Image (cartoon, rainbow, N blue to C red):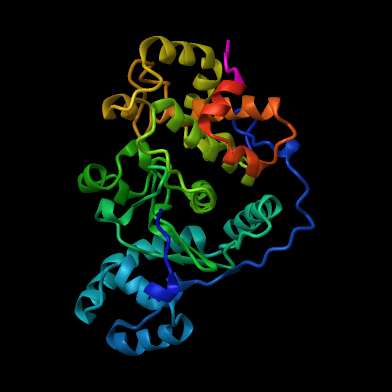
Amino acid sequence: MKKISLPLLVCFFLTACGDKNNAPDVSGVKVDVKVDRFDEAFFSIDTLQMEQGLGKIQQQFPAFLPVYLQNIIGITDPGELKMFYQFYRPVFDSAQKLYKNFNPVKDELEKSFKYVKYYFPEYKTPTHIIPVIGRLDSRQDLARMANGEYTPNFIGPDLAGISLQFYLGSNFSGYQTENFVNNVAPLYRSRRFSREYITPEVMKLIVDDIFPDKSNGRPMIEQMIEKGKRWWLLDKFMPQAADSVRTGYSKKQLDWVNSNEGMIWTFITKNEDLYAIDPATLQTYIGEAPFTQGFDQEFSPGNIGPWIGRQIVRKFESANSNLTVKQIMETPAKKILEEAKYKPK
């Protein structure tokens, strides 16, 4: 997970709609969220007076500016910084066309933070949302979370940072270049580089922060369930969201898994060792891919393991309605598998 310590570093229908009908009432839950437009402050600098401009930003963002320069873009030399500014100014301009009014994103995050506070009152949700423009030239610009997924975003004490350069729409020209496709994100991933994925990707960081995934090295079925638990928790935090957005599947992929749940489970149980730990088997079902080997290449999604895991957790939840969200998250994967008695048709 990409988490910054400031003291240290200084709806569609059916498949598209969320679980709004079963969501708790959070209208009385109070959260304080403010958007600090670091991106606008940085790209308003006069490049002929770079040092003076940085001085003004230092006054506005005394703790965050060093983090941005050293850890996000990795540039402190004034000459290199000026080159970065000039190269990424068009990226900022593209972001401004989409995000000059950031209130819709703020409102989505604020609503999801309320659900976090409802289920976990002691957890400190971010109070500052900081949009930035970072680099686009390396996979290093995407941090790997504990659950194995990549994110361009970060959280820290009281803040959530959003890297807008990765949310410019799937057709953004920068995502189509050979270097970007080969070294940063293939097209099956960059199709999700749009506004509707900002909130779920920030919320995945919060899920990862509350319940870090420690299942690496465990048998495949346990990893499926542990990752599925985190998808299930994301559902709780974002009941208003489309399931396609929460899972990252396209609508046709989501329709396919929902229509073929029994076949998927039968195939896996008949052809694989559920307790396998070898990388080849794990990578087939867990992790980003354009499709899942052994299934329809046009309709099946990659990373199908967490989806199966979430289905098992949902079955366990329905049989244990007395358990709290926290208790379910803390239930061992083995116990969930045994008691869920998962046998989809």
Q: Is residue 49 left or right of residue 319?
A: left
Residue at 52%, 67% in the rendered image: 159
Q: Is residue 203 above or below residue 31?
A: above
Tell me, yes or no, if residue 210 can be seen here: yes
Magenta region includes residue 341: yes
Residue at image position (71%, 39%) is 20
Part of the protein shown in magenta: 340-345
**Image height check: is 234 above or below 166?**
above
| Residue 310 percent coordinates (x, y) | 55, 30
In the figure, residue 154 lies in which quadrant?
A: bottom left
The residue at the point 60 percent across, 32 percent down is: 16
Residue 276 occupies quadrant:
top left
Camera-side residue: 53 or 330? 330
Choose top left, top right, bottom left or bottom right for residue 153.
Answer: bottom left
Question: 133 above or below 170?
Answer: below
Query: Number of numbered discs present?
Result: 0
Q: Quadrant of the C terminus?
A: top right
Give the x, y percent position of residue 112: 63, 52
Residue 236: image location, x then y, percent: 64, 42
Q: Main secondary structure of the magenta part?
A: loop
Classify residue 119 as left or right of residue 149.
right
Asked if the magenta segment contains residue 97, the reply would be no
Q: Is residue 297 left or right of residue 40?
A: left
Percent position of residue 146, x then y = 40, 47
**Does residue 239 appear left or right of residue 82 in this picture?**
right
Query: Depth check: 327 or 63 in front?
Result: 327
Along the line of sight, the residue nearer the viewer: 209 or 64: 209
- In the rendered image, the vertical position of residue 301 relative to residue 103, given as above or below: above
